[in-house]
Amino acid sequence: MTNMKQSEENYRTLEIYALERGIALFGVAKYDPVEARSRLSHQEQDGLSFAISMGVRLSGQVLEGISDCPTFLYQWHYRQANFLLDRVAFQMGGIIQEMGARALPIAASQIVDWEAQTGHLSHRHVGVMAGHGWIGRNNLLVHPRFGAAVRYVTILTDLPLTVDGPVEGGCGMCRACVSVCPARAIGETAQEYDFGRCFAQLKAYRKKVGQYICGICVKACQGTG
Ligand code: B12
């Protein structure tokens, strides 16, 4: 089999595996540690040249229940989304190993540096490279149809795969997230997103629902089509 054909077949096998397990979005990017804001060690990521990016959709009805504060149902939903992403990534890592390649599943929502508030790498930036959407005004990865109501996970691998590219698109005139943000942390561009304000608000919500979550800008962001 030609290399190209093998890469296509590997892609299709993993995509079907993911979609059958509740994943809504599947894409692959050429892995660039700088682009992905990686903090992984050299040993962990050396030679892993592909990044698989997968997303699960959040329930519109659960988000509907959020008005000025995250709900307990949203907290449960957030955790289930993380469990599903982590489980599929974990299992897919095993399958890739069975196929004779290396795989590094990255936790969906693990903070490795509490002071800098960073994960192992940025699932949002990998998702952009894998063609899921763009970084919106709300600083979240915005899918053209599902908006920001998607959570993501990444697997790094050296299994040959065909790659997707970034999609065209942007928030355009939409400012739905700007006015609803209770912390006034969202500005004209993602660069203006005010981490300090957002984090202070999340700290307050944590006292109510036990988790650093909000969901208000997620609910407001419906995508562009
Ligand atoms: C740490 C973290 C947070 C932190 C910091 C957010 C941030 N901007 O990085 C806090 C707790 C604030 C947070 C909040 C939220 N998060 Co969060 N978070 C993460 C996590 C675990 C790591 C992100 C990371 O490494 N960021 C660092 C770099 C890459 O981000 P950056 O934008 O380039 O740089 C930022 C920092 O430098 C920070 N910053 C700037 N100045 C300063 C100053 C100081 C002192 C500090 C400490 C930081 C800081 O702001 C910069 C700009 O955003 C990811 C999962 C992952 N591994 O990707 C989820 C993730 C980004 N979060 C997610 C979500 C949904 C949320 C919330 C909506 C909460 C909720 N679930 O209700 C809010 C929304 C915040 C927003 N609008 O951006 C999703 C996004 C999904 C999507 N569709 O885009 C992710 C991808 C989780 C997932 N598996 O899907 N999050």
Image (tube, rainbow, N blue to C red):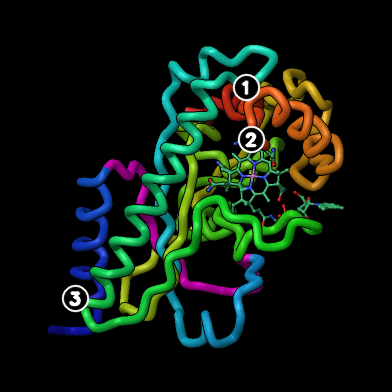
Please give left or right for residue 23 compared with residue 81 in the image: left
Mark 2 or mark 3, which is nearer to you? 2
Give, as a three-letter code, the residue at label 2: Gln
Residue at horizontal 48 percent and vertical 38 percent from the top: 79
In the rendered image, residue 166, in percent from the top left (x then y), is placed at 51, 56
- Determine the main secondary structure of the stretch shown in magenta: loop
Q: CA distance from mark 3 to mark 1?
A: 47 Å
Residue at horizontal 39 percent and vertical 75 percent from the top: 157
Q: Which residues are magenta?
A: 22-36
Please give left or right for residue 13 compared with residue 114 in the image: left
Give, as a three-letter code, the residue at label 1: Pro
The residue most toward the left is 1
Nearer the observer, 144 or 64: 64
Q: Quick check: 43 above or below 132? A: below
Q: CA distance from mark 2 to mark 3?
A: 45 Å
The residue carrying mark 3 is: 5
Q: Look at the numbered disc 3 and say if its residue's Cβ is closer than 8 Å to ligand 1.
A: no
The residue carrying mark 2 is: 211
Q: Look at the numbered disc 1 and say if its residue's Cβ is closer than 8 Å to ligand 1.
A: yes
Q: Report if residue 187 is visible in the image.
A: no
In the rendered image, residue 68, in percent from the top left (x then y), is placed at 69, 14
In the rendered image, residue 129, in percent from the top left (x then y), is placed at 52, 60
Q: Earlier in the sequence, mark 2 or mark 1?
A: 1
Q: Quadrant of the N terminus?
A: bottom left
The residue carrying mark 1 is: 70
Give, as a three-letter code, the residue at label 3: Lys
Residue 117 located within the stretch drawn in magenta: no
Which secondary structure lies at badge 1?
Answer: loop
Q: Quick check: 190 above or below 5? A: above
Which secondary structure lies at badge 2?
Answer: loop
Please give left or right for residue 127 compared with residue 203 in the image: left
